Amino acid sequence: MKKLFAVLGDPIGHSMSPVMHNDLFKEYEIDAHYHPFQVKSEDLPSAIKGLKAIGISGFNVTVPHKSSIIPLLDEVDELAHSIGAVNTVVNVNGRFIGYNTDGLGFLTGLTPYTETVTGKNILVIGAGGAARAIYFTLGKNKPEKIDIANRSVNKAEELINSCPYETVSKALSLEEASKVIGEYDIVIQTTMVGMAPNITEQPLSLELLSPNALVCDIIYNPLETKFLQEAGKKGAATQNGIDMFVYQGALAFEKWTGIFPDVNRMRENVLQQLGGQ
């Protein structure tokens, strides 16, 4: 019997996950199908009951359900619980178990650029859901410091105070961060500033950026944001959001199937989809 996998979100039509995962099922000769479901927030509890009733094998969760799904699950992984968000659910003998692969997906995607984040000075820009997943995951890996810059400094402080791992961190305004940007080995842009169609925007100035820094932007449409363009002009190494997207998907696929897939194939698939827009 064909296994069913899915992604739940609202909206969901833009998701590239179905094409990516269905290609992997075909590549690894797995009799399964991955389907996007648009689920309104008020319908989420009944949707989860329905998915359990039909015996879905697993599913992804995206905006706006990553936090609201938690009380609807039978069990939540420790890291996902601390982050307060789930993006991957596995059906284990009828029990829905939630995980968060966003932060680990980002960290795994850093491997070609830096061997380790341990001992590094890191700046995270933004204090939303993606920043939280990345900050908590990095916090487990003992960087020298992880500062957070955000439009609302109070929100950055709340994020720092909620982290269950011991970190050396301070909250900065965007203006303050731009003045000390040269201190950081890794700068991670987690907001939606600069995403299409607003491609001329960037969250803060990189005028004082070190040319030895690695600058990451979790946006992948456009492939090179203005933020990354400016970083490149300063001589810094840059990384867009495709690696995080691909690796979080690869980690979800592994949890469902026991197979860690060909990430290069996944990356090419995503690039082809982006090129087709």
Image: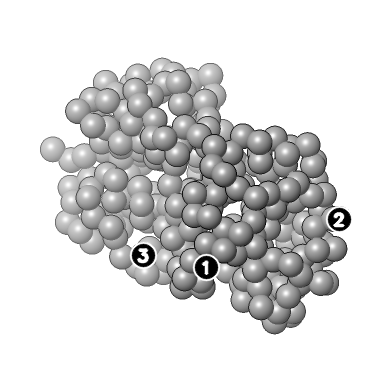
Kindly identify the amino acid type of the residue bearing the numbered disc 3.
Val
Q: Is residue 16 visible?
A: no
Q: Residues within 10 Å of mark 2 (few under 14, many from 20)?
A: some
- For label 1, the residue is 275
Separation of disc 1 and disc 2 at Cα?
A: 35 Å
Determine which residue is flagged by label 2: 175
Question: Residue 47 occupies which quadrant of the picture?
Answer: top left
Front residue (pair 72, 21): 72
Q: Quadrant of residue 225?
A: bottom right
Mark 1 and 2 residues: CB-CB less than 8 Å, in contact?
no
Closer mark to the observer between disc 3 and disc 1 = 3
Q: Nearer the viewer, mark 3 or mark 2?
A: 2
Q: Which mark, by number, is residue 129?
A: none
Residue 263 numbered mark, or none: 3
Classify mark 2: helix, strand or loop: helix
The answer to whether 10 is drawn above or below residue 220 in the figure is: above
Q: Amino acid at mark 2?
A: Glu
What is the quadrant of the N terminus in the image?
Answer: top left
Residue in the foreground of this view, choosing between 9 and 86: 86
Name the residue: 38% across, 35% down: 77
Q: Is residue 89 left or right of residue 161?
A: left
Determine the CA span between mark 3 and mark 2. Answer: 37 Å
- Give residue 204's position: percent from left, percent from top: 80, 59
Helix, strand, or loop for circle 3? helix
Residue 38 placement (x, y as % from top left): 48, 33
Instruction: Point out the tag, 3 or 2, that comes first from the N-terminus.
Output: 2
- Find the distance from the CA under tag 3 to the CA under tag 1: 18 Å
Q: Amino acid at mark 1?
A: Gly
